[in-house]
Amino acid sequence: MADGHDGKSATEATFGLEVDGPDLAAGFARFAQIPILIGLSIAMTLFLFTFFVDIYEAIRSFEFLDRKKTILLILNLLDMVFIANLVIMVATNTYNTFRLKKVHSGEQVMIHGQKAYRRMKHRIVSTIIIISSIHVLSELLEFSQLSAIHLAAIIGLHLVLLLTYIATNVFRSAE
């Protein structure tokens, strides 16, 4: 053809996408996720580094010999594992959404994306509540270092998260 793309649009030739009109914006929005995925990968690398630094510091300072400090270290490491899993869930879901266009087209992309969102929403909120529970437990173990207002705020935030989860997942009709 005269345009040099064998009948393909410029976007299709450039990105391997078959897009028209509104789909063009969706195609570019999908590619805008690439820097986010790269940023999450970098953040996970830094987080992994802090995980091993915490273990090293505990061994170097012999904190693991104190039962309370060992429990706090384990809670901190569990917290880091759940946060890492949360980031991995989000990154995986983002990547799968990025790839959707190659498998599905048009209305199928929206339907498949909404189903994936509903599945992930429950996992993400559950993980956030677990992380919050670990923080509350850690703060309770370090109660002597906290003010009562600080502790009440942490517990209040955790209760808000729990109530939000219950309201959006337990009492909501199945979709």
Image (tube, rainbow, N blue to C red):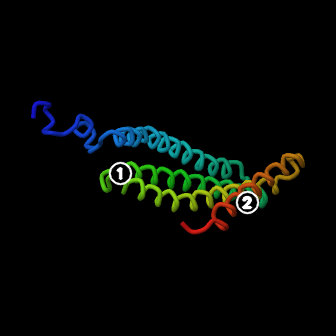
Q: Nearer the viewer, mark 2 or mark 1?
A: 2
Task: Compute the Cα span from label 2 to label 1.
Answer: 34 Å
Q: Secondary structure at mark 1?
A: helix
Residue at 70% x, 57% y is: 164
x 38%, y 38%: residue = 25
Label 1: which residue? 99
* Left or right: where 152 falls relative to 65: right
* Residue at the image position 37 percent from the left and 54 percent from the top: 107
Within 10 Å of disc 1 (Cα), the crowding (few <14, some 14-19, many 20+) is some
Pick the residue in front: 90 or 142. Answer: 90
Which residue extends farthest left?
A: 1
Q: Inspect the image, locate mark 1, and give the three-letter code of the amino acid beneath it.
A: Arg
- In the picture provided, is 110 more to the left or to the right than 75? left
Please name the residue that numbered disc 2 is placed on: 163
- Residue 41, position as x, y percentages in the image: 47, 44
Q: Residues within 10 Å of mark 2 (few under 14, many from 20)?
A: few
| Image coords of residue 64 (percent x, y) | 71, 57
* Residue type, label 2: Leu
Q: Secondary structure at mark 2?
A: helix
Residue 42 in the image: state x and y as whole percent: 49, 41
Image quadrant occupied by the N terminus: top left
Q: Position of residue 99 (x, y in %)?
A: 35, 51
Q: Which mark is residue 91?
A: none
Q: Is residue 41 left or right of residue 105?
A: right
Asked if disc 2 and disc 1 are in contact, CB closer than 8 Å, the reply is no
